[in-house]
């Protein structure tokens, strides 16, 4: 059993260095709601092979970038209009988590 995983049905990601349980990944957004920037936090292990996307309610992607290796990433939101967005974290081609982000002017 992988540390942090509760059963054999949990989603796992294999890396060259270790095995990561995707069920218990802690992420965060702050501030939320946001105006001009947001900081996305995630486990440092996701920095190698992780992707961050921000998309709107129609599914249009407004931001996409590889995750930085130190476990946090600041994203400039000045180009986004007021509204609801989704921040999606992907690791090794597996969607890990989707968070709601409210942007206002």
Image (cartoon, rainbow, N blue to C red):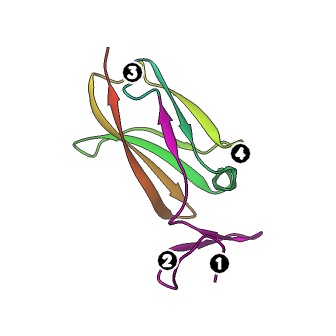
Q: Which residue is mark 3?
A: 79
**Screen quadrant of the C terminus:** top left
Disc nearer the start of the sequence (2/4): 2
Q: Residue at x 51, y 82 (%)?
A: 7
Q: Which mark is residue 10?
A: 2
- Please tell me which residue lies in front, 20 or 77: 20
Q: Which mark is residue 45?
A: none
Tell which tag, 3 or 2, sits nearer the viewer. Answer: 2
Q: Is residue 44 left or right of residue 81?
A: right
Q: Which residue is mark 4?
A: 69
Q: Is residue 17 left or right of residue 24?
A: right
Q: Residue at x 61, y 70 (%)?
A: 4
Q: Which residue is mark 1?
A: 2
How far apart in space, not on screen, are marks 2 and 4 (Cα)?
Answer: 25 Å
Classed neighbour count for the residue bearing mark 2: other residues with Cα under 10 Å, few (<14), some (14–19), many (≥20):
few
Could you tell me residue 51's position as x and y percent? Answer: 54, 50
Q: Is residue 1 left or right of residue 39?
A: right
How far apart in space, not on screen, are marks 3 and 2 (Cα)?
Answer: 37 Å
């Amino acid at each position: 059993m992988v540390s942090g995983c509760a059963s054999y049905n949990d989603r796992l990601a294999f890396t060259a260095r270790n095995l990561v349980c995707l069920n218990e990944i802690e992420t965060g957004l702050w501030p939320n709601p946001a105006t001009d920037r947001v900081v996305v936090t995630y486990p440092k292990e996701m920095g190698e092979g992780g992707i961050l996307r921000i998309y709107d309610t129609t599914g249009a992607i407004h931001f996409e970038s590889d995750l930085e290796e130190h476990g946090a990433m600041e994203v400039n939101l000045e180009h986004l209009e007021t509204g609801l967005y989704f921040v999606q974290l992907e690791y090794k081609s597996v969607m890990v988590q989707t968070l709601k982000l409210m942007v206002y002017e």
